[in-house]
Amino acid sequence: MRVIVIGAGVIGVTSAFYLQRAGHQVTVLEQHRAAAQETSYANAGQISPGYAAPWAAPGIPLKAMKWLLQDHSPLRIHPQSDAFQWQWLAKMLANCTLDAYQRNKNRMVPLAEYSRDQLKLLREQTQIQYEGRTLGTLQIFRQAKQLENGRRDAELLAQMGVAHQLLDRNGIIEAEPALAHIADQLVGALRLPNDETGDCQLFTQQLAQLAASEGAVFRFASSALNLRTQKGRIHEVLVAGETLQADAVVIAAGCASRQLAQQLGLDLPVYPVKGYSITVPLTNVNAAPCSTVMDETYKIALTRFDQRLRVGGMAELAGYNKNINPRRIATLKMVAQSLFPQAGDLTQAQPWAGLRPMTPDGTPLIGATSIGNLWLNTGHGTLGWTMACGSAKVLADLISGQRPEIPTEQLSLARYA
Ligand SMILES: Cc1cc2nc3c(=O)[nH]c(=O)nc-3n(C[C@H](O)[C@H](O)[C@H](O)COP(=O)(O)OP(=O)(O)OC[C@H]3O[C@@H](n4cnc5c(N)ncnc54)[C@H](O)[C@@H]3O)c2cc1C
């Protein structure tokens, strides 16, 4: 089959790779001159099935109100004149019940775990290098209340069969020796030993090269402008004056997926939730984390790459702008300084902001649509790097008429019908 994939972020590139391996003839359209120039550019680097959970959770509305009043808050809402922002927020709030949380988590965890297993297989098959580590992640608690919530999370993880350890101060120092200087300010931690880390941009670009070497065609600096339908199917994809034909089209365009689908009368509930990161060159690797440390107080993740520290997090609902607010960058630097003061040169930190393509229920949109040959792989929100390989593999199976290895019925757009 000839398949056009729109978007060369981590989701589009993994889709292209698995589709190519399934025997299809794949063309990827990407508006930028290289892969992973948008949200997959500088994320927090966590491959974290253990934290696969929707942001919409019981207690979040109250917490959100408190956060909005805090300095160094993990959340900001800038009201827009765009009705979609309010509709999306209303849908997200409706997902903050216990029932909805459990239903959404039960959709996300199997996909995230499957994805980590697919990534492992891919590594074995291709030897792909992306500054990856398999040393788990460590969520640290500064307050007793956080530890109590951590215990509750641990019970949930036990029910779902996800490996985890609750650590005291000694355990924290054993897992991340560079935290010894601040251990007396921590009350405990939750470690997820099977989580992984790595540079998502590097992975995406390496995988794009691999897919290209196996026959996939990457057309960079090529925007998909229009998707034309005939008899309920995509008939042509318009790219700068040229029309392309395909048997199947996949929208994997991150936050732009909504606008592309809108042309076709499809309403994708994918809102851009802005996050920030800094990338810091390491000057003393012994004073740096070994893997990811997640500071629960600020909801900021600090991830070790070979010679760099990536510090990322925060959520801003502020429409599609990617402006960098210096106050957010100051918060990231403050947390890095507090946890790993000797690790790197913060004056050389590279700031970045990206837009997470988020659905109100936290679960991505993967699968068929009401348009015969149009498929979706988008809306991965906070977990696109974590869920990429699994999402792409199930999409390739569905397009190839194969039965996916995990349930996918609840992943498609139909759940919003
Ligand atoms: C601060 C921050 C930290 C994060 N940390 C983590 C983390 O630790 N772990 C994790 O799992 N996830 C994390 N995420 C989320 C993750 O980065 C995203 O879910 C993921 O990158 C989304 O990938 P994507 O391919 O869907 O979108 P993108 O990477 O945005 O790719 C979409 C691509 O489509 C292209 N495109 C759009 N429209 C068109 C068009 N019309 N024609 C051609 N091309 C088009 C764009 O140029 C872009 O390259 C984080 C996100 C942020 C912002």
Image (spheres, helix red, strand yellow):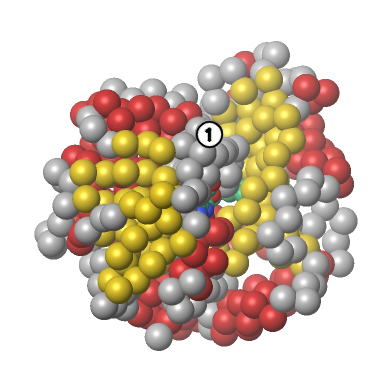
* Residue located beneath label 1 in the image: 33
- Quarter of the rendering occupied by the C terminus: bottom left
Is residue 200 visible to the viewer in this orientation of the structure?
no
Observer able to see residue 303: yes
Q: Residue at x 46, y 24 (%)?
A: 131
Relative to residue 70, is residue 353 drawn left or right? left
Q: Secondary structure at mark 1?
A: loop
Depicted 79 relative to depicted 158: above or below: below
The answer to whether residue 12 is above or below residue 60 is above
* Front one among 56 and 403: 403
Q: Is residue 416 left or right of residue 374?
A: right
Q: Disc count in the image? A: 1
Which residue: 58% across, 56% down? Answer: 356
Q: Residue at x 41, y 49 (%)?
A: 242
Above or below, 311 against 299 in this view is above
Q: Residue furthest top?
A: 283
The image shows residue 258 at horizontal and vertical percentages of 52, 67
Rendered location of residue 225, percent (x, y): 50, 57
Residue 171 x, y percent position in the rendering: 54, 36
The residue at 26%/52% (across/down) is 3
User: Residue 30 at what x, y percent from top left?
Assistant: 47, 44
Cβ of mark 1 under 8 A from ligand 1: no
Q: Which residue is nearer to you in this view: 34 or 94?
A: 34
Quarter-of-image position of residue 250: bottom left
> Which quadrant of the figure has residue 26?
top left
Residue 132 location, quadrant: top left
